[in-house]
Amino acid sequence: MTKGDVIYEGKAKVMYATDSPDKVLVYFKDDATAGNGEKHGVIQDKGIINNKISEYFFKLLKTNGINSHFVEVVSDREMLVKKLNMIALEVVVRNVAAGSLAKRLGLEEGTALKVPVLEYFYKSDELGDPMLNRYHIMAVDIASLQELDEIEHIAFCVNTIMKDNLRAKNVDLIDFKLEFGRDEKGKIILADEISPDNCRFWDMSTHEKLDKDRFRHDMGGVEEAYKEMLTRLTM
Ligand code: ADP
Ligand code: UDP
């Protein structure tokens, strides 16, 4: 596999073309941002850890019948994935109130939700990722009703599979964000990454945060938390 030109450089990853037109190489950086890019920093070795954790979850999902863009890991910081036409949505699933939901509904962080909540945000840095509902998404043609049904079905399956797996590692899955794309046939495929950058993981016994919230809120022990998650998943 030959690494080609940079197709896109984002906040956390760089996408490279490859000699295969339907595959891209994802390079995981150590850069971390929060608050729509207002806070910027570096989390030592985050790229290596997020590459490994994403590999772990994509493989776990595959074993449980959920396909993703994941093809293979090719180095410490790189994975080969299927090239998709990305849908400009952040799909958030929540089991426990935290972050923006706790604020919006005036709930104490850690309040269990009676049913999992699914939310959509428009992936647009200029607009500050506003929240959308199904009607907005269909009205401006971001995705069709049928596609949203498929996205929600996959997102809730991912939630169940990850929650069950993490329970055995004494980790509570509080919430997470997924992204989806369309393959050459228009099929909806799970994409991007699944890591402490886009999930909230709490130790089940102590409620210690093992994710990017430690960076967002200057709590210290950021690198240690990412390492701890990798250890729990793979040891
Ligand atoms: P951001 O764009 O939010 O700064 P990243 O730094 O994580 O994000 O950059 C990765 C980019 O690659 C994102 O825009 C994401 O939507 C996109 N992406 C993820 N998976 C794929 C894929 N399989 N094919 C094409 N693009 C992808
Ligand atoms: N999230 C993400 N990218 C974003 C916004 C949120 O990966 O741009 C993830 C975040 O890590 C959390 C979930 O989505 O697991 C819900 O985030 P929330 O809306 O509470 O965002 P906050 O405003 O607290 O970042």
Image (cartoon, rainbow, N blue to C red):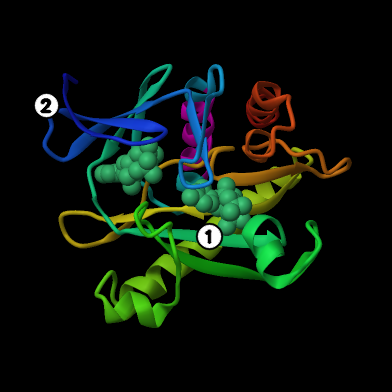
Q: Quadrant of residue 232?
A: top right
- Residue under pointer 1: 92
In the image as oriented, which residue stretches furthest toward the front?
38
Q: Where in the figure is residue 140, as x and y percent of width and height?
A: 26, 76
Label 2 residue near ligand 1, CB within 8 Å: no
Mark 1 neighbour class, 10 Å CA radius: few under 14, some 14 to 19, many 20 or more = some
Per the picture, the main secondary structure of the magenta-coloured stretch is helix
Looking at the image, residue 12 lies above or below residue 93: above
How many numbered discs? 2
Q: Is 163 covered by the magenta stretch?
A: no
SS label for mark 2: loop
Tell me the crowding category of disc 2: few under 14, some 14 to 19, or many 20 or more residues within 10 angstroms, Cα based: few
Q: Quadrant of the N terminus?
A: top left
Which residue corresponds to the image point at 64% horizontal and 33% vertical from the top-left?
215
Near-viewer residue (125 or 158)? 125
Q: Give the labeled residue for mark 2.
A: 19
Q: Is residue 180 visible?
A: yes
Q: Is residue 188 left or right of residue 212?
A: left
Vertically, is 105 above or below 71? Answer: below
Q: Nearer the viewer, residue 170 or 114?
A: 114
Q: Between residues 167 and 36, which one lies in front from this camera angle?
A: 36
Q: Is mark 1 within 8 Å of ligand 2?
A: yes
What's under tag 2, amino acid-wise?
Asp
- From which residue to which does the magenta span run? 49-60
Indicate whether 1 appears above or below 214.
Answer: above
Task: Tell me what residue is drawn at x 56 percent, y 17 percent.
Answer: 44
Q: Amino acid at mark 1?
A: Val
